[in-house]
Amino acid sequence: MQSLWLSQTFAAALLLTVALKFWLATRQMRHVAAHRAAVPAAFAGTVSLNAHRKAADYTLVRSRLGLVTLAFGTAVLLGWTLLGGLDALNATLRDALQPRWGNMAYQLALLSAFVLIGSLLDAPFELYNTFRIEQAFGFNRTSLRLVLIDAAKGLLVGALIGLPMAALVLWLMASAGAWWWLWAWLAWVAFQLLILVLYPTVIAPLFNRFEPLADESLKQRVQSLMTRCGFAAKGLFVMDGSRRSAHSNAYFTGLGAAKRVVFFDTLLERLSPGEVEAVLAHELGHFKLRHVPKRMFTILAMSLAALALLGWLTQQQWFYTGLGVTPNLAAPNDALALLLFMLALPPLGFLAVPFASRISRRHEFEADAYACVHASGRDLAHALLKLHEDNAGTLTPDPLYVRFYYSHPPASERLAALKMEPT
């Protein structure tokens, strides 16, 4: 009875999620298409009609691909769960590996095979997005060779870092008793901190080149801003983002005093020194207003609650059978439980998305306000417009779609909050 209830609940949640995503996506597409012919009045003096239409077309094409990937992803999810795909993969690997190589090898192989199959299933959509959509709109600068190299590096890094972590969690699930989930959470927290330390100096340089910021005038301006804001960074670096894409960005990375400021070379090519300073002041605002630790605390709290729930579910047979898997009798079910939980959680938690998006948008407004105190609000407004145009961000998104999905406020709302005319 409980298995049937779980199957029905999961199916209903998945159906509701897919229907809601489809409805929101089609609303967005209709709204953008209906406003494609004319630049919004507030932007008439600064955004050309061609740029506005390009942004609309880019949004529409990506939305259509999103609907295709939504349908395909839903079919794959059903295939893994209620249609028995994960059960078949588990049985095959268990029978082939567990008697000879033991429980740990079999479970790591199950996790690895699942990730690899998922990556292969996603690859055609990612390649189409890169070499058809991004290429058509002038954003793609990568090659198939570089994509394959990146994929190989990603698999290697994932294996070197992910497999030991997975082995530790599986060992804790088997050996730490009823409170294994608490120890696994502590291990995961330590793992996240380790990644924050390793990413800037070990992982990121495997994929991109990082050169110290050479523009002395801009360097002094940025350092003066960080001094005013009471922010310490170990270095200012320029990343060769143009090797792969024409999109622009800037970010902080690292932990504690080892934090780095990283600018995409495309950002420095497009923005004036004052606009770069304003964008950086916005990012500093996230740190000074403690948005980053607040988000980290939320993620850590939610992960603790999720692992506690998983700790209980692993002991319930209906958790496995209700999601299309027959529990092992002669081998552990820990890897199975991890994968089932990962598959079932997104549809059941999708309705939390608009609440997280709302908090994120509020943080963006707060960081904009902080930037206006420590840099030029007009420069920030100009930078936002340039970044929207460079990234082909639509100026006319559907309001409901924005409220549900957007982690950043639309350009019109940000400029209105800045009380700056886009001129």
Image (cartoon, rainbow, N blue to C red):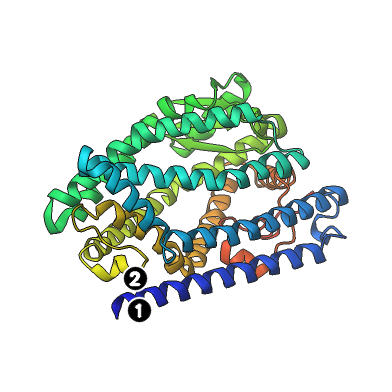
Q: Residues within 10 Å of mark 1 (few under 14, many from 20)?
A: few
Amino acid type shown at disc 2: Gly
Camera-side residue of 386 and 276 = 386
**Pointers 2 and 1 in contact (C-beta within 8 Å):** yes
Q: Left or right: where does residue 343 sit relative to residue 35?
A: left
Where's residue 64, x and y in %?
70, 58
Image-quadrant location for residue 403: bottom right
Camera-side residue of 70 and 418 = 70
Q: Residues within 10 Å of mark 2 (few under 14, many from 20)?
A: many
Decide: is 201 above or below 311.
above
Image-quadrant location for residue 325: bottom left
Camera-side residue of 1 and 298 = 1
Q: Which residue is mark 1?
A: 5
- The answer to whether residue 209 shows anywhere in this view is yes
* Mark 1 secondary-structure assignment: helix
Where's residue 380, x and y in %?
66, 45
* Mark 2 secondary-structure assignment: loop
Q: Which residue is mark 2?
A: 322
Decide: is 365 above or below 198.
below
Quadrant (top left/top right/bottom left/bottom right) for the N terminus: bottom left
Where's residue 188, x and y in %?
28, 46
